[in-house]
Amino acid sequence: MLVTVQELGQTSLYPEIINKITRNNQESAEMQILAAESYVRSYMSKYDLKAIFGTADTEPTFTGADVNLIKKMVKIIASYYLVRLANPNVNIELYRADYEDALLWLKDLQSGAVNPTLPYMEDDPNTPEIEGGSDVAWNSNPQRKNFF
């Protein structure tokens, strides 16, 4: 996981709030974080996700400054997911506003309106099509030949 429950408890939600929401079940909090990571990944198809998020067997290899921005998006979404489960002593509207702002930023990231310094997915020459989307696309109608 890119974000741990302890890290979420230090930056986005107080640990006692997380414990109240999940009833001291660490796995429940981890499930919400994994769901948030999957959600963020779904907007990042053109980036090297293995380098940014790592895999089940390997740690992330990219450690640039903009990874903190991706972590922040995961934390915002995971916090909102947790607060939706139960609402002990937090203002859910603040978390919802942060969540909506994060979604707008992710849509801008996907469309190319924002361009953080994250590694792009490497091109595999053995694939016939572009992998992971592209910032540039073009199309054309077949050429017609007219005779008069």
Image (cartoon, rainbow, N blue to C red):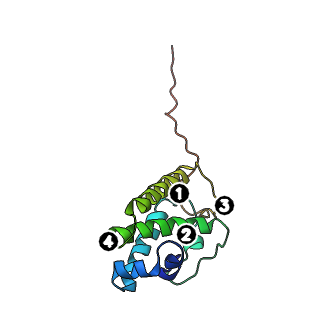
Q: Identify residue for label 2.
A: 71
Q: Is residue 24 left or right of residue 11?
A: left
Disc 1, SS: loop
Q: Are marks 4 and 3 in contact (CB under 8 Å)?
A: no
- Mark seen at residue 128: 1
Tag nearer the camera, 4 or 3: 4
**Disc on the earlier residue, 2 or 4:** 2
- Residue in view at x 51 percent, y 60 percent: 45
10 Å neighbourhood of mark 3: few (<14), some, or many (≥20)?
A: few
Identified by mark 1, the residue type is Pro
**Disc on the earlier residue, 2 or 3:** 2
Q: Are marks 2 and 3 in contact (CB under 8 Å)?
A: no
- Residue in view at x 55 percent, y 44 percent: 137
Q: Give the image quarter of residue 16.
A: bottom left
**Disc on the earlier residue, 3 or 1:** 3
Identified by mark 3, the residue type is Thr
Residue 23: percent from left, percent from top: 33, 84
Disc 3, SS: loop
Tag nearer the camera, 2 or 3: 2
Q: Identify residue for label 4.
A: 85
Q: Identify residue for label 3.
A: 117
Q: CA distance from mark 2 to mark 4?
A: 21 Å
Disc 4, SS: helix
Residue 125: percent from left, percent from top: 60, 62
Q: CA distance from mark 4 to mark 1?
A: 44 Å
Q: Is residue 141 visible to us here? A: yes
